[in-house]
Amino acid sequence: MTGRRIEEYRLYEAIQRQPKELARLLTASEPVDIAADVLGAARRVFCIGIGTSWNAACVAADLLARAGIDARAWSSADFVQYPPAFTRDDAAVVFSHTGTKQFSRAAIDVAGAKRSPIVLVTSTESAIEGGSLPMGTTVLRTVAREQSAMFTVSHTAAMFLMARVAHTVLPTAVGDLEAIPYAVEATLGLEADIEALAHQWHGKRMLIALGAGPHEPSAHEAAIKIAEAARRQVRGHAVEQFLHGPQVQTRESDAVLAFAGADAGHERTCEAAAFVHRLGCEVAWVSPEPAPDHTLHLRVPNVGEALAPLVEIVPAQLLAGHLAAIEGVEADNFRRDDAAFGAARAAIDL
């Protein structure tokens, strides 16, 4: 295929808009205080989503846990089909950017049937109307509905609003929220290095994203972005899970994107990077911390362990877009330009 320019994609404008939107959300008059009161009073909090929203739910559960809340992440499909012992003393946080995914909507109904408090994190143009929500649902609105199927700014916005909630519950829980827009802006400055990396990795057999602890959702999100936009073979793993089986499949023609910080999983992530390097793989290290030998360092600003996922995902977004441009594929349309795929996809209700 003929290559394209990343600027042709709608996803690119969304990626570039993130600092501005995050700065706006820092003081936006969303009912963050109400959400904090609701979640802070709950016995347990279930953070629920699917796809990119699942990764946001994982980050949200970690942020809330740091504020002293018993929070855990659930796939919306599992929450609906294999529900936990959920009572009205518990609360649900449902992430759904468009408001169209069937299991996320059903999760709201499941929680509503228990008369449990619900916080919905959705776009300013959500398909879920306020009148259709259970009484008392608190709605946090992120950004306008994304025009690309590869969600970027809505994801960072959703995580940021939940960071505000956690901060409201316990002001020392997550770190300096005001630093995030500037950190994302600075990270966008890595684009030239990331574009060069995309050209370097263009012919790789498999791309593997790794992260430990709070960085694991970034690995899974990176895999989703690269799959959606560039249609490349890609996997995302927790570092330790990768080392207990999937590492056997690794070949020298693969490349690894590793997310890390100055936290408990740092040493093990370094060991994983050293392992794949010994196999002949190229490694890109996304971290504020010094990179291991023989890796490309994509140095991101240090915003602390809790808020790292909001910043470190940006290089993966740009990498996905540049890989798509090199491949010459349509990155914005979820492969609907492929007639066979489009027909198969139309038979499934997401």
Image (cartoon, helix red, strand yellow):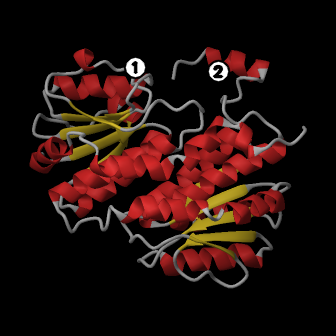
For the residues labelled 1 and 2, say whether their Cβ atoms are less than 8 Å apart. Answer: no
Q: Nearer the observer, disc 1 or disc 2?
A: 1
**Residue 55, visible in the rendered structure:** no
Identified at 11% across, 34% down, the residue is 88
Q: How busy is the neighbourhood of tag 1: few (under 14 within 10 Å), some, or many (20 plus)? A: some
State which tag comes first along the sequence, 1 or 2. 1
Comparing 191 with 314, the one in front is 191
* Quadrant including the N terminus: top right
152 relative position to 143: left or right = right
Q: Amino acid at mark 1?
A: Ala
Given residues 253 and 331, the one toward you in this image is 331
Q: Which residue is mark 2?
A: 345
In the rendered image, residue 81, in percent from the top left (x then y), is placed at 36, 28
User: How many labels, in total?
Assistant: 2
- In the rendered structure, the answer to whether residue 88 lies left or right of residue 80 reads left
Q: Residues within 10 Å of mark 2 (few under 14, many from 20)?
A: some
- The x, y position of residue 108, in whole percent, is 28, 27
Residue 167 on image: x %, y %: 22, 59
In the rendered view, tell whether residue 279 sits above or below residue 329: below
Residue furthest right in the image: 2
Circle 2 SS class:
helix
| Residue at which label 1 appears | 127
Q: Residue at x 60, y 42 (%)?
A: 13
Judge left or right: residue 6 versus residue 68: right
Residue 242 lies, with reference to residue 122, above or below; the image says below
The amino acid type, in three-letter code, at marker 2 is Arg
